Image (tube, rainbow, N blue to C red):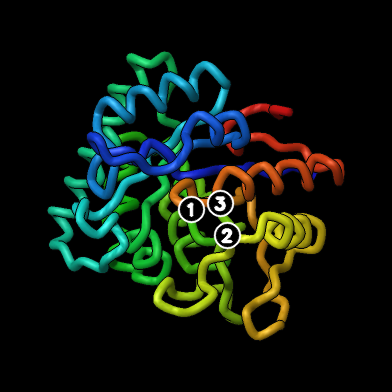
Amino acid sequence: MRIDLNSDLGEHYGSWRMGDDESMLETVTSANIACGFHAGDPKTAFATLTGAAARGVAVGAHVAYPDLAGFGRRPMVLPADELEALVIYQIGALQALALAAGTEVRYVKPHGALYNSIAFNEAEAATVIAAIRRVNPELALVCLAASPLVEQARAAGLRAVSEAFADRAYEPNGALVSRTEPGAVLHDPELVAARMLQLVERGTVTARDGSEVEIQAESICVHGDSPDAVNMARAVRSRLLGAGVDLASFTDAVRQ
């Protein structure tokens, strides 16, 4: 068995600090790096890219709505041409920084409200897919596992990477529980690790009503902005390796 472990990193902004990128880069196999629209700045992105390159961690563009004040988690309705340009701009900026840091952007993972919207909004998803294809059709698109976006991206010729979330609760239909609901975000490292071992071994996660939801995922995300992020990522990594699961980026070779 083999799976990727990713985290959303590079989210410091000026003097505002978010997460522990150094510790997370020692733990994950892929890093989704903020492009400055929901969080992050050029200095932070460059430092995170440099750290990822030094550790052999794959990097992707963590694109978002232009919403620094809301951390990209507020829904927005943008004209298609504007959204397309924003996605292209963010990928391109990170590509330049990655080149200077000695690495390359291998995939795109939308953030927050944009991620949740395109998982089910076919028209908006088509705009994001078009933007990625204009930049580089070889870039993979990380998608919510079991969402319609997976097949839509594949039909458009992109590699769609199905993703599960270690630190989020699930609805019985496979959607994530809204962050406005109690219990939407999980914090117990051992519980999170056990859930992800279940995912890898049985292809299911337990929904908040106790039912088991079938989810086939190539990547597991631990959000970098959670206070317990490092401990949760380490617990997931340890539990999976202990069960004989190979941890490797979906873009690269096995990394132990």
Q: Do the residues labelled 2 and 3 touch (CB within 8 Å)?
A: yes
Label 3: state its secondary structure: loop
Mark 1 or 2: in front is 1
Q: Provide residue 38's location: percent of width, then percent of height.
A: 27, 49
Using the image, determine if residue 253 lies above or below residue 108.
Answer: above
Task: Report the side of 204 relative to 23 (left or right).
Answer: right
Q: Name the residue under label 1.
A: 226
Q: Which residue lies furthest to the right in this view?
A: 243
Give amino acid for label 1: Ser
How many neighbours does mark 3 have within 10 angstroms: few (below 14), some (14-19), or many (20 or more)?
A: some
Which numbered circle lies on residue 2?
Answer: none
Q: Quadrant of residue 190?
A: bottom right
Q: Mark 2 points at which residue?
A: 167
Task: Report the side of 6 relative to 50 (left or right).
Answer: right
Q: Do the residues labelled 1 and 3 touch (CB within 8 Å)?
A: yes
Task: Name the foreground residue: 206 vs 83.
Answer: 206
How many neighbours does mark 2 have within 10 angstroms: few (below 14), some (14-19), or many (20 or more)?
A: many
Label 2: state its secondary structure: loop
Q: Do the residues labelled 1 and 2 touch (CB within 8 Å)?
A: yes
Using the image, determine if residue 23 lies above or below residue 122.
Answer: above
Q: In which quarter of the image is residue 72?
A: bottom left
Q: Provide residue 224's location: percent of width, then percent of height.
A: 48, 46
Residue at position x 47%, y 22% in the image: 51
Task: Name the foreground residue: 19 vs 71.
Answer: 19
Task: Name the foreground residue: 224 vs 62.
Answer: 224
